[in-house]
Image (cartoon, grey):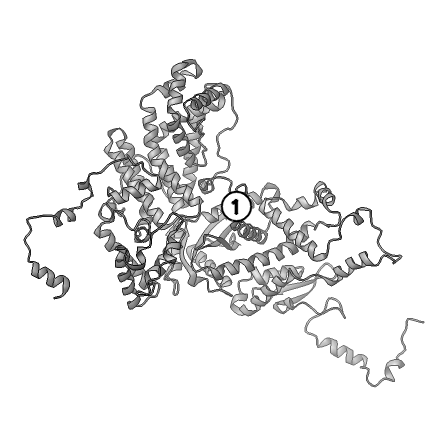
């Protein structure tokens, strides 16, 4: 038999091992190879235990050595992904091994398979081979794409899919494949599984390496945390940081559906996420504040996290955007505001239904040269549209009055009577004074330039407007309700950090601040200096530098220009006398982003990605999409991106299904129904937001709570000319808003100091002041 071997061939060779030796050698191997005589196993197997053959031939089962995670199919990409991103225990047992895994994953994107390259080159060069593959004419009409270029195009395709919310199934669509083949027949579209596993892992490795560079370069970070329930009803928590240059970086997105969401559990999860990132970077030392929404669980979690050893330098803050959203919802629910909104909704609904009325209004506005040509419509899920709508009525008051005066039949009697009502536009003007600063707050949040100083100015202006409403007899009841809302909602902001940031802002420099306010600032900054680990000498330098800053002495006399930001201005300060102790603290405070809008924005993106027909995305894929989308969004100026689906307050609302019926009708009696539906939708949105934040809705009958509220009058003179000028520059008030007399700027202490009948000894005064 030709295929048989004779036993004598081995017996005559003394160097050849016997069959018994072969058995002994094979038995000494610690694991069974899936294919005897095959290539050496990947190094990732050193972190996994071989659990035997899988059901599919050629595959093995595996179990993580650190967390005991079991894999029915030990695929390399899944094993690398688990060890690098999903295993929490590897950080405790083998942190250096995780570093090696991450570095190897980053090297995958530069590697190419030699077999594929060889196969490609064979197709191109070996034209004389009789067994070569038969090609079509399209193959010779375009340039052959190399394997490395194929991988690059795959990654660009993945970016386009992620950034535009396209389903991964699109790449298997026949029309899409035909479209790509028409562009370049040499390009082979990857399959859906390949792009969601191999390509996604390579792109994620690249993004994480870039994020690591951003974290290394950043000096100060703000930590955000929030939860979300996806379409599969899984509870996902997102962790991200915002750098001092206002770039967002997603740290992790984890599924915690199987656990009770207690403050202790969330704190432990947060430490686990930070420990995973801190393998290469000490991220905790760079975190300046942790900002979340304000349920009891989140509030307790902030307290637990900041009280741990090594975390005392981190400040726990409540999200400013959520507070503004709650304030706006409470104000709109008042009978004065709801009646005004109901009236303007009647008019705007009729405008949208009647083409003739809208056309005539546009012609009248153009005739008297008004920039606004139509009335703005209120969007129920975005309450800043209330301010836009009120402003449009203020601008178009004259065209509206002239229109109904010239022809009363142009609109139904109800619309005409509302426009001719003398108090209608007066009520609009008063309500706009309240909604304008709230809309301004959202606008600066959208621009990612909100600082703690801006928050304090908004709070002050709300109190100032409230006082005006109480003084006015016609709006006194609404003013008291606004005051009650502001006092209750802003209790969480009783922190001198906002006052200190206002004082350290080089443009404001504490304009209008009284002695008690300056004392509070000095005390807080001294305590903060001690909290972040400064010694006594450094804290004394901070106090001394504050005195020089107040009188604009030395380097602190630098002018604040329109192109400067607080951070850039303080970066230019070089106070060698006090070792830049004050500028270091100022840079830390102005690096804090006082809102947690980034998680809400990201959840909106993921909800767009995780549509009804794409509800099988696992948490790892969602986390990869979140990281890739956020990274490329940082460097993109595309205003049409799916992340910017509207104003920020639209992201803070919880209802997607609550909306006003968009269908128009020519029935003139339907305008009242639209107004009632709008008010009901706004109230429902506000109620759900209060439930999420575990806050009570404030109604008109609720008693005024004067305990633990801001005492602005003892800290800041809001009628001071400097403070008024700041409000004018911000656009809160006009130059003619109010002219305060010089005597209005004097406090009781100023009057006492200016008294001319006080008797005192000059020599004693000089001795005490100059230590003579």
Q: What is the number of callouts on the image?
A: 1
The residue depicted at 37 percent of the width and 34 percent of the height is: 332
Q: Quadrant of the N terminus?
A: bottom right
Q: Furthest residue to the right?
A: 1
**Label 1 residue SS:** loop
User: For mark 1, what is the residue?
Assistant: 637
Residue 458 locus on image (x, y percent) = 33, 43
Which quarter of the figure has residue 183? top right
Q: Is residue 469 above or below residue 201?
A: above
Which quarter of the figure has residue 553? bottom left
Residue 464 locus on image (x, y percent) = 28, 40
The residue depicted at 67 percent of the width and 59 percent of the height is: 73
The residue depicted at 33 percent of the width and 42 percent of the height is: 729
User: Does residue 627 appear anywhere in the picture?
Assistant: yes
Q: In which quarter of the image is the C terminus?
A: bottom left
Q: Is residue 459 above or below residue 496?
A: above
Q: How crowded is mark 1: few (under 14 residues within 10 Å), some or many (20 or more)?
A: few
Q: In this view, does 582 lie above or below 656?
A: below
Residue 606 locus on image (x, y percent) = 54, 46
């Amino acid at each position: 038999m030709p295929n048989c071997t004779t036993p004598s061939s081995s017996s005559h060779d003394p160097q050849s091992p016997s069959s018994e030796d072969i058995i002994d050698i094979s038995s000494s191997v610690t694991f069974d190879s899936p294919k005897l005589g095959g290539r050496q196993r990947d190094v990732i197997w050193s972190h996994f235990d071989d659990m035997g053959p899988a059901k599919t031939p050629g595959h093995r089962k595996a179990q993580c050595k650190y967390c005991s995670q079991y894999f029915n199919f030990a695929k390399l990409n899944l094993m690398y992904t688990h060890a690098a991103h999903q295993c929490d225990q590897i950080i405790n047992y083998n942190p250096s091994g995780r570093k090696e895994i991450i570095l190897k994953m980053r090297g995958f994107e530069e590697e190419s398979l030699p077999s594929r390259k060889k196969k490609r080159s064979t197709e191109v060069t070996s034209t004389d081979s009789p067994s070569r593959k038969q090609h079509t004419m399209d193959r010779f009409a375009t340039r052959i794409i190399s394997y490395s270029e194929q991988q690059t195009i795959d990654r660009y395709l993945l970016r386009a899919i992620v950034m535009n919310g396209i389903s991964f199934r699109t790449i298997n669509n026949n029309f899409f494949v035909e479209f790509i083949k028409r562009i370049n027949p040499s390009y082979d579209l990857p399959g859906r599984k390949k792009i969601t596993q191999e390509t996604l892992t390579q792109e994620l490795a690249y993004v994480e390496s870039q994020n690591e560079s951003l974290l290394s370069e950043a000096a100060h970070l703000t930590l955000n945390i929030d939860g979300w329930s996806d379409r599969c009803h899984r509870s996902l928590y997102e962790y991200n940081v915002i750098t001092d240059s206002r770039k967002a970086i997603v740290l992790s997105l984890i599924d915690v559906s199987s656990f009770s969401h207690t403050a202790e559990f969330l704190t432990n999860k947060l430490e686990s996420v930070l420990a995973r990132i801190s393998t290469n970077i000490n991220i905790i030392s760079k975190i300046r504040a942790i900002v979340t929404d304000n349920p009891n669980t989140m509030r307790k979690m902030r307290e637990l996290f900041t009280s741990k050893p090594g975390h005392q330098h981190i400040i726990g803050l409540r999200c400013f955007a959520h507070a503004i959203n709650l304030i706006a919802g409470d104000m709109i629910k008042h009978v004065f505001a709801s009646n005004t909104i109901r009236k303007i909704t009647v008019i705007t609904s009729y405008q949208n239904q009647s083409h003739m009325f809208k056309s005539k209004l546009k012609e009248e506005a153009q005739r008297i040269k008004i920039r606004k040509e139509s009335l703005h419509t209120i969007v129920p899920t975005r309450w800043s549209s209330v301010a836009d709508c009120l402003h449009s009525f203020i601008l178009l008051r004259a065209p509206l009055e002239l229109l109904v005066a010239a022809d009363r039949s142009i609109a139904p009697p109800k619309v005409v009577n509302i426009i001719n009502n003398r108090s209608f536009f007066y009520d609009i003007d008063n309500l706009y004074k309240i909604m304008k600063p709230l809309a301004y707050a959202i606008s600066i949040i959208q621009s990612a330039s909100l600082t703690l100083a801006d928050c304090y100015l908004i709070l002050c202006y709300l109190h100032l407007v409230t006082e005006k409403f109480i003084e006015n007899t016609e709006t006194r009841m609404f003013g008291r309700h606004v005051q009650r809302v502001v006092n209750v909602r802003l209790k969480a902001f009783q922190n001198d950090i906002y006052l200190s940031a206002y004082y350290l802002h080089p443009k404001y420099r504490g304009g209008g601040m009284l002695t008690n306010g300056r004392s509070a600032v000095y005390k807080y900054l001294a305590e903060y200096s001690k909290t972040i680990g400064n010694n006594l000498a450094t804290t004394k330098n901070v106090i001394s530098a504050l005195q020089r800053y107040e009188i604009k002495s030395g380097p602190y006399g630098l002018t604040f220009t329109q192109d400067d930001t607080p951070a850039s201005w303080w970066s230019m300060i070089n106070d060698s006398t006090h070792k830049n102790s004050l500028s270091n603290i100022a840079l830390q405070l102005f690096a804090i982003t006082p809102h947690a809008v980034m998680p809400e924005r990201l959840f909106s993106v993921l909800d767009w990605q995780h549509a009804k027909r794409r509800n099988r995305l696992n948490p790892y894929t969602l986390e990869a999409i979140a990281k890739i989308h956020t990274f490329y969004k940082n460097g993109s100026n595309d205003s049409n991106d799916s992340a910017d689906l509207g104003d920020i307050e639209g992201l803070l609302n919880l209802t997607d299904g609550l909306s006003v019926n968009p269908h128009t009708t020519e029935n003139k009696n339907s305008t009242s129904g639209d107004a009632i539906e709008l008010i009901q939708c706004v109230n429902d949105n506000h109620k759900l937001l209060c439930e999420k934040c575990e806050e009570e809705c404030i109604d008109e009958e609720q008693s005024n709570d004067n305990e633990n509220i801001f005492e602005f009058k003892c800290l800041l003179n809001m009628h001071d000319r400097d403070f008024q000028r700041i409000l004018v520059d911000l656009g809160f008030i006009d130059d003619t808003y109010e002219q305060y007399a010089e005597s209005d700027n004097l406090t009781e202490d100023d009057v006492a100091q200016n008294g001319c009948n006080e008797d005192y000894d000059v020599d004693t005064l000089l001795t005490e002041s100059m230590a003579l």
